[in-house]
Structures are given as structure tokens and as C-alpha cells.
């Protein structure tokens, strides 16, 4: 049986609520996760990674102006080349995020572990949800099993495995965008840090620079060896042929 097309009413869907991010760290951390996914799946276009972006999932939500904007999320098996200012579920064939990460703060931790966790578990049915508290560098996560979130067990390094992203999530202390702090980063199955596209390009440039230095050193060493052999030949009165 064919169902008639339903014309949806025009809706005013705000893309921001005017509330600033908690800290500069939060802004940079969101970009770090997004950029890391882009490197991880650099050969793919079938995903969307967003941060601090509203997700619209029901008309009641719009009517009540109940904005929900995860700090970081990934939706798989969608057109990643399409630009979006908000994630509107009914315009995305009913697709919800596969992974959500909330970057907590003292003012949001109870909400992240309470109402948001319940929403992602019962309404979004998001397979994996992670909550990171930068104040204590503490990471907790859950995976949906039989309709309920089951808390993930960390490894010896305190990292949590994401089946959806096929990476570990864990702490990394270092400098990113000129800020030295402890960041939430991705690690591959072997525990190697997943870089951002910019970091990977910088690493490639460093390797090329070291390779050029090595070649220059080898060339100088070869010239020195040739000069030494010439001197030895001259000492024995042997002319070069």
C-alpha cells in the first residue's frame, strides 16, 4: 500500500541559543574530535561529524523550544558532503547519531549523566554515549545492549573502546592549537594516537625534512670519502683514470 506524501509545515529551527561554550578548552576539544574523525575516515564521505549543533527530533521539541546540542556526535551511512547547520532527524531519513560525546563541566555534569543520558538511550537509541569530565580527566561510556545502556569497562590505560568508531577514547596530555592541556583523543587498535589532518600533514613535512637532511648528510659523507680516497691515491703516486 502506498502512503500519500505528507507536507510538513514550515518550521523555524534556530541553530544557536546564544549560550557561549563553557571554556576555550571546550571549543578546541570539539574541533579536535571532529578533525580526528576526518583523518580517521579521510577516504570516506558516508558520515557526518558535528559539534555543538542542535539535533531536532520531534515537533513537540520544536514547539517547546527544547534545544538539544551534543558537544560531539557522528552519524554514519549518510551524505557527508552535505552542509548542515542543524541535524534535523525527519530530513535525514530518521537517522540519529551513532556516537555522542558530551564534554561536561560542573554546571552540566548532572544533566549529562541524567536527562541527556536518558534521552540518548530511550529516544535517540544512540549505540554509544561517552561523557568526559575535563576537571578530573574522567571518561565514562555506555553501549546500547538489549535496549539499555551498559557501562563500558576501561582498559589498563583507562581508555574505552568504541565499536562505532573502531578506536579507543582516552586522555592525551600535550599542546593542541597552542594550548597545553589534557585532551580527549582517539587511539587506534594498537594504541597509536590518531592525528588530525593538520597534525598528519605536519608529521609528513617533518619526515620529508629529516629525509632531506639524511640525504644531504649521506652526500657530504660520500664526498668526504671520495676526497679521502683521492688523497690516498696521490700519496702513493697513483693518478686517477
Image (cartoon, rainbow, N blue to C red):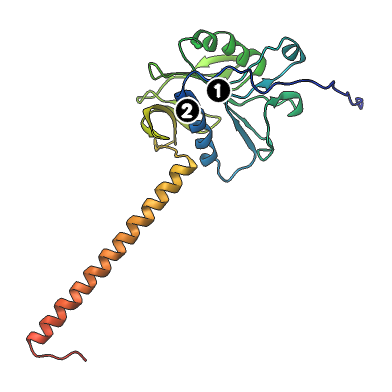
The percent coordinates of residue 162 (x first, y second) are 50, 28
Q: What quarter of the picture does the C terminus occupy?
A: bottom left
Measured in 3D between alpha carbons, the distance from the residue under mark 1 to the one under mark 2, in whole angstroms, is 9 Å
In which quadrant of the rendered view does residue 221 lie? bottom left
Horizontal relation, residue 144 to residue 89: left or right: left
Answer with the quarter of the image where residue 143 lies: top right
Residue 121 visible from this viewpoint:
yes
Verify CB contact (< 8 Å) between mark 1 and mark 2: yes
Q: Position of residue 76 (x, y in %)?
A: 63, 33
Residue 207: x %, y % from top left: 37, 53
Q: Residues within 10 Å of mark 1 (few under 14, many from 20)?
A: many
| Residue at x 7%, y 85% (from the top left corner) | 235
Residue at numbered disc 2: 29
Pick whichever, 44 or 50, lies toward us: 50
User: Circle 1 sits on which residue?
Assistant: 71
x then y, percent, for residue 230? 15, 82
Residue 218: give its label.
none
Residue sitting at x 40%, y 47%: 203
Q: Circle 2 — which element?
A: helix
Q: Foreground: 64 or 162?
A: 64
Quadrant in which the N terminus appears: top right
Amino acid at each position: 500500500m502506498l502512503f500519500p506524501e505528507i507536507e510538513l509545515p514550515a518550521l523555524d529551527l534556530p541553530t544557536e541559543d546564544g549560550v557561549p561554550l563553557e571554556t576555550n578548552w571546550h571549543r578546541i576539544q570539539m574541533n579536535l574530535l571532529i578533525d580526528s574523525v576526518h583523518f580517521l575516515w579521510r577516504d570516506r564521505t558516508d558520515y557526518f561529524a558535528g559539534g555543538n549543533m542542535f539535533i531536532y527530533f520531534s515537533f513537540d521539541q520544536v514547539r517547546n523550544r527544547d534545544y538539544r546540542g551534543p558537544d560531539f556526535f557522528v552519524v554514519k551511512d549518510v551524505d557527508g558532503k552535505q552542509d548542515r547547520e542543524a541535524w534535523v532527524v525527519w530530513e535525514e531519513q530518521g537517522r540519529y547519531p551513532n556516537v555522542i560525546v558530551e564534554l561536561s563541566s560542573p554546571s552540566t555534569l548532572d544533566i549529562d549523566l541524567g536527562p541527556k543520558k536518558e534521552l540518548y538511550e530511550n529516544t535517540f537509541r544512540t549505540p554509544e554515549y561517552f561523557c568526559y569530565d575535563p576537571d578530573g580527566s574522567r571518561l565514562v561510556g555506555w553501549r546500547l545492549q538489549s535496549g539499555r545502556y551498559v557501562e563500558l569497562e576501561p582498559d589498563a590505560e583507562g581508555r574505552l573502546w568504541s565499536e562505532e568508531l573502531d578506536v579507543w577514547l582516552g586522555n592525551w596530555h600535550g599542546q593542541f592549537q597552542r594550548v597545553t592541556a589534557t585532551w580527549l583523543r582517539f587511539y587506534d587498535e594498537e594504541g597509536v594516537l590518531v592525528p588530525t589532518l593538520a597534525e598528519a600533514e605536519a608529521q609528513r613535512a617533518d619526515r620529508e625534512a629529516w629525509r632531506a637532511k639524511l640525504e644531504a648528510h649521506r652526500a657530504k659523507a660520500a664526498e668526504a670519502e671520495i676526497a679521502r680516497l683521492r688523497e690516498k691515491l696521490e700519496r702513493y703516486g697513483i693518478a686517477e683514470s
